[in-house]
Image (spheres, coloured by chain):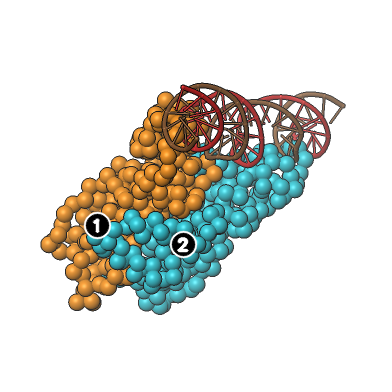
Chain colours: A cyan, B orange, C red, D brown
Amino acid sequence: MPTDRSSAGDPARTLALLWRQPPGGPRRGPARALDLDAVVAAAVGLADRDGLEAVTMRAVAQALGVAPMTLYTYVPGRAELLDLMLDAVHAQTARRDTAGRPWRERLTAVAEENRALFAAHPWAAAVSTLRPPLGPGSTAKYEHELAALDDTGLDDVERDDCLTHLLSFVQANARAAAEAQAARRQSGLDDAQWWTAAGPLLARVLDPARYPRAVRIGAAAGAAHGSAHDPDHAYRFGLARVLDGLAALIDARR
Amino acid sequence: MPTDRSSAGDPARTLALLWRQPPGGPRRGPARALDLDAVVAAAVGLADRDGLEAVTMRAVAQALGVAPMTLYTYVPGRAELLDLMLDAVHAQTARRDTAGRPWRERLTAVAEENRALFAAHPWAAAVSTLRPPLGPGSTAKYEHELAALDDTGLDDVERDDCLTHLLSFVQANARAAAEAQAARRQSGLDDAQWWTAAGPLLARVLDPARYPRAVRIGAAAGAAHGSAHDPDHAYRFGLARVLDGLAALIDARR
DNA sequence: CCGGAACGGCGTACAATGTACGGGGTTCGG
DNA sequence: CCGAACCCCGTACATTGTACGCCGTTCCGG
């Protein structure tokens, strides 16, 4: 598993796959037993169930009933497969029609749609950052989300900036949630078990005289939500802040 | 490289390492040739120069002139080493004293300090999310950053929320920048080369009638900054939005 | 002073991963 | 009908983290 990065190979080849452009020329040899969509679907299924690290070429092949090396006739390598997976789930996301509603409601819907995407596919938060593969699914998603910024008085560059900012927030939140869950699964300890194991040493070493704010506020935050970090609360709090921040810009433009 | 996650092992053991608590009891056997700080420093040096993926146990050992397995007498495993690396760079970050300045200036300084941290150690953006190892470096950093929220009229939980929100933004931005650079280095293509390779196919497939906003705004954003994504611009834009969003909360509390 | 136990250093080995290479069978254009 | 293109895939290799166990060193208790 060298990297989880995408867009690693030849851009033209990757784009041709994303847009399902068959290579021109004569078709020789036996018919293909699978098709690209089946490979991508199998990989997405594995990732949804067991996380990105479960998406090994061998596992995907086994899920499809073929030998591992067979996959390389459909996909140049694992990096491109990740691109295709991401574009596939982007294509599937629900897109509410909020035309005519106020901008704040429209952007809230965009945030919720992305939150739902990451809830269904937690691995997607870890794959790319705000440079998605320029496939049909991601492009349609981008188009839909830009529509939420119609009639805001912003210029084109500002609209891209605002959308990027909003999506970056949602993705960062989803990534934190996914990592917290992965840590729980991997260590086998829930939050309470972690504290009983770490508590005594922390109590001895976290001197309230030396770290007054950290000890007090860390304890308050931990008590407020059940755990050390509550992604749901961070999402609600953060989304309100992000929208307020965008409001300052949008209101100034009117 | 199974995972880049941290906090994988026994919490008590990890915390004892972070706080440099020597195991009690009699000291037998030969004196240690290295110490933990040297191991961590070597790993940080490798990561700074060549990225996280260069931090293999074999590479760290070679940098120290010992055999790979020797490291395991200092560190339980790679995950704990990552925790120690992160806490070490947290301990080293510059901390400006902005007491008495307005809150917006203080939070800007906090953001800048974190930005500088990620500039010096790009890998740090990829390691943890907002659940850092509770070591002395991270705790001191948390304490310092909370001080920027003194006298804002916020309660304890809100202060943690605001700081988390701000840091999450800076980290997400740094992660995007690091991934963009890694993609450039790994593929060997800069942005212009990527476009000349991908341009023709994209021109054929990105139908302006089907994706009017995406085509227009994507082109405008790409033209505005030199590239498809400009982390510096996203940082300046996003930080202003984040501070405006926090202002809406803080001003309401007064 | 000495013997056993604890410890540091590390050589070897193993399982998992992505994927290069090449062979064998199948299909089709000329 | 034959050669070339293409599919499927068995084998192999480099790279990773790290478990296991051997050997020599050091120190405590007698």
> Which residue position is annotated with label 2?
A196
Q: Could you tell which of marks 1 and 2 lies nearer the N-terminus?
A: 2
Q: Nearer the viewer, residue A10 or A113?
A: A113
Could you tell me which quadrant the C terminus of chain A lies in? bottom left
**Marked residue chain, label 2:** A
Q: Is residue B65 visible?
A: yes
* Kind of element beneath mark 2: helix
Q: Amino acid at mark 2?
A: Thr
Residue at 38% from the left image edge and 38% from the top image edge: B36
The residue sitting at the left extreme is B100
Q: Using the image, determine if residue B1 lies above or below residue B169.
A: above
Q: Position of residue A86 (x, y in %)?
A: 54, 54
Residue at 41% from the left image edge and 51% from the top image edge: B15
Residue at 48% from the left image edge and 73% from the top image edge: A97
Q: Amino acid at mark 1?
A: Arg
Q: Nearer the viewer, residue C5 or A38?
A: C5
Residue at 33% from the left image edge and 55% from the top image edge: A205
Q: Nearer the viewer, residue B96 or A45?
A: B96
* Kind of element beneath mark 1: loop
Q: Position of residue A80 (x, y in %)?
A: 56, 44
Q: Are marks 1 and 2 in contact (CB under 8 Å)?
A: no
Classify residue D18 by image quadrant: top right
Q: Position of residue B168 (x, y in %)?
A: 35, 58
Classify residue B182 by image quadrant: top left
Q: Gap between marks 1 and 2, in whole Å?
A: 23 Å
Q: Nearer the viewer, residue B109 or A4?
A: B109
The label on residue A140 is none
Asked if badges 1 and 2 are on one and the same chain, I answer yes
How packed mark 2 is, by other alpha carbons closer than 10 Å (few <14, some 14-19, many 20 or more), is few
**How many marks on residues?**
2
The label on residue A210 is 1
